[in-house]
Image (cartoon, grey):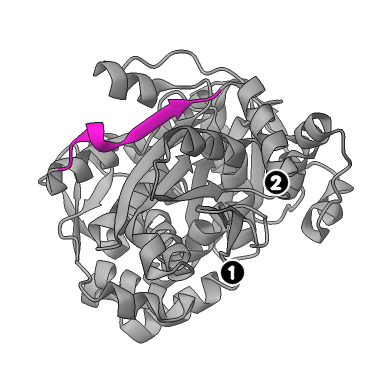
Amino acid sequence: MKLYNIKENEEQVSFGQAVRQGLGRNQGLFFPSELPKFDDIDSLLAEDFVSRSTKILSALIGDELAEEKVNSMVDAAFQFPAPIKKVKDGVYALELFHGPTLAFKDFGGRFMAQSLAAVSNGGKITILTATSGDTGAAVAHAFYGMEDINVVILYPKGKISPLQEKLFCTLGKNIHTVAIDGDFDACQALVKQAFDDAELREEIGLNSANSINISRLMAQICYYFEAASQMSKAERENLVISVPSGNFGNLTAGLLAKALGLPIKRFIAATNANDTVPRYLETGKWDPKPTVATTSNAMDVSQPNNWPRIEELCRVKEWGLETLGKGAVTDAQSAESVKALYDQGYLCEPHGAIAYRVLEEQLQEGETGLFLCTAHPAKFKEVVDEILESDIELPAPLAKHAVMELLSEDLDNDFDALKVVLRRVQK
């Protein structure tokens, strides 16, 4: 399987190169040159999660890695379920928070760690990634303690939840966390600057674990198939999926699942007040505004990195962007939906509640609705407790880290200062 750079199509790389390199020239994202199509979807959905995911990922990777090797990677990465829970007739929640860091990023982070180990040539690697909350924890825990791999995670100081911060900023060893004086887009811009610095990239073996890395994105395709496998054939024939969207990796993965043959009727891109994409789909004008802080902080992204992949996929498949549903939700509306879900017996947090709200507004008669719950409600305990006037019990992973000391260092939004940190970490 070859992948090409969306910005410079002549740059083509193998899966291993794409995993090691992260980004192509000119900050271009890699995209598969071919997309396999599974015809017998019912048989595929009848398999267990690991076996099915092995077939999906092997088809995408091609003969570069033996299927037995891919199976061992998937088995090591996907050691937790992705169950769907019925909220009411015709509406389900896909729970993606049963991994070690209680967020959907565990699937991609752990598979990327397995992939990098499989294709690494033995040299030292520095993983540099930006997080708006959950990516940091998933990547940190996936790579924690791995030899010859240092991880540097940038996050916006004071703009992620305290429990999110505790979950990945208390590990130490090969995990280095940096609180940037700026928003997530500033952190993401610093990552891009680092990748544009060819000398630095070569010197420290730079790689990224954001959803721009193709291995993370490919892993996320698998839980869409897993969700459909838990439904009746009639339900999944008219399936509408609402995706809480920030950097748009999750929606990209869902659209790729559809391209591979999963019968998804349509998708809905649900955002918070950072509504660049819904406005673009409405007006045709790409007009990012300054990022605003919301109670759904993992979606506080005004310049989503993965959007070019969605446009490329729609171009390749000749899908019109207008077929995408869209909606932007305020904090007040998100809180209303957290309450509405709770009244129906389902405990949710703001990100999932945003996806639920837009789904409710756009679901039509005869359709089955699925909304993604991307993080455990306890990761946003302060917000959810205030909305519900409750006291959510902390699950074990959060309770353990909540009392640990933060090990982060503060840094100005300055690339030269970041380079000093990156070189120090690699020594």
Residue type at the position of mark 2: Gln
Give the CA distance from mark 2 to mark 1: 23 Å
Q: Is residue 210 above or below residue 141?
A: above
Q: Is residue 223 above or below residue 207?
A: below
Binning the other alpha carbons within 10 Å of mark 2 as few (below 14), some (14 to 19) or many (20 upward) gives few
Residue 196 coordinates in the image, percent (x, y): 34, 34
Dot label at residue 117: none
Question: In this orientation, which residue lies closer to the viewer: 389 or 167?
Answer: 389
* Residue 302 in view (yes/no): yes
Instruction: Based on the picture, tell me whether residue 426 belongs to the magenta stretch.
Output: no
Q: Which residues are magenta?
A: 319-329
Q: Is residue 52 above or below residue 159?
A: below
Residue 357 coordinates in the image, percent (x, y): 54, 34
Q: Which residue is mark 1?
A: 81
Regarding mark 2 in the picture, which secondary structure is present there?
Answer: loop
Q: Residue at x 61, y 45 (%)?
A: 134
- Is 237 situated left or right of 145 in this image? left
Dot label at residue 344: 2
* Residue 427 in view (yes/no): no
Q: Residue furthest front?
A: 365
Q: Residue at x 41, y 25 (%)?
A: 303
Residue 13 coordinates in the image, percent (x, y): 20, 57
Question: In this orientation, which residue lies closer to the viewer: 361 or 329?
Answer: 361
Where's the N terminus, which quadrant? Answer: bottom left
Instruction: Based on the picture, tell me whether residue 324 belongs to the magenta stretch.
Output: yes
- Is 29 situated left or right of 180 in this image? left
Upstream in sequence: badge 2 or badge 1: 1
Q: Residue at x 25, y 74 (%)?
A: 64
Q: Quadrant of residue 51?
A: bottom left
Q: Is residue 149 above or below residue 71?
A: above
